[in-house]
Image: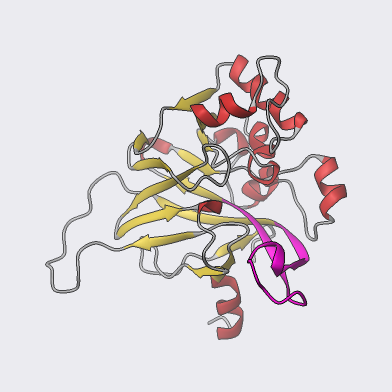
Amino acid sequence: MADPAVRRRWLTLPIAMTCAWLVAGAGSSAAPRAPREPVWRIHAIRYATIPAFPVRALVVGADSTRTLDIAMMFWLLQGPAGRRVLVDAGFYRQKFLDSWKTAGFVRPSEALRRLGVAPDSVTDVILSHVHWDHLDGADLFPNARIWIQRDEYEYYVGADGGPAHAAIDSLDAAMLAGLMKAGRVKLVEGDGKEILPGITVYTGGRHTFASQYAGVRMARGTAVFTRQCLAAAASICVRSSANGSSLQPRRAGGA
């Protein structure tokens, strides 16, 4: 059995990177109900670390001397009919690596491959918003359909493929416009839309102009992937998964 201290460290996911938790069904006094199909299995994949990041940049009023190592992550959802869905896609372009001085970086596509999943087998990528660390890797998955809110896309990506407003990088705007031209982008029309069986996206966090978060049906409840829509806590602990064990991020190397 893993050392408890190590286990706790892996279970605490920095809010700067991602948030997800399991919303259970009825109270303990209620009779258990059979899960509604379809249900999904979830994997958290860590592909890099940003070391010694100042906590005050994430949490208002935090001690200016505090730092944390940010786990750079995305999520793999495995579901019915062989669907493999990513929640966000990480980043890989050299300009971001040069700017952020990451440790232990591997491309998100390679991190996924080390989990035993081929990048070209990914069927869908749900983009929470257009910031570089969530969007940049979308073109690493050549057969994936890209899901983004219509309002988010139209606000940030100009007709010429350049940035229409700040928050999206010029390279990422051009990449996303190219994916749109290729017919691979699916624009979501607002709040509470079930985009795939068992996966519903919601708006309201306003981390960017029209950021979205996802609810994913599991065997024992619904996992909610808030991404950066939730900013009230410094970290969150993911306790349960479909088989009753903890959802732990996996290092790209398999640890």
* Residue at left offset 60%, top offset 76%: 9
Q: Is 253 in front, or is 95?
A: 95
Q: Is residue 112 magenta?
A: no
- Could you say which quadrant of the image residue 28 lies in? bottom left
Q: Position of residue 207 (x, y in %)?
A: 56, 47
**Is 22 situated above or below 106?**
below
- In the rendered view, does 189 fall on the left or right side of 198? right
Which residue is located at x 41 percent, y 54 percent? 224
- Quadrant position of residue 245: bottom left
Q: Residue furthest front?
A: 61
- Percent across and percent down for residue 179 are 62, 22
Q: Is residue 144 visible to the viewer in this orientation of the structure?
A: no
| Image quadrant occupied by the C terminus | bottom right
The residue depicted at 22 percent of the width and 53 percent of the height is: 35
> Between 119 and 24, which is closer to the camera in this rendering?
24
In this rendering, the answer to whether 226 lies above or below 232 is: above
Q: Is residue 29 left or right of residue 240?
A: left
Q: Is residue 167 left or right of residue 203?
A: right
230, 43: nearer the viewer: 230
Query: What are the residue bounds of the magenta stretch?
Result: 48-74
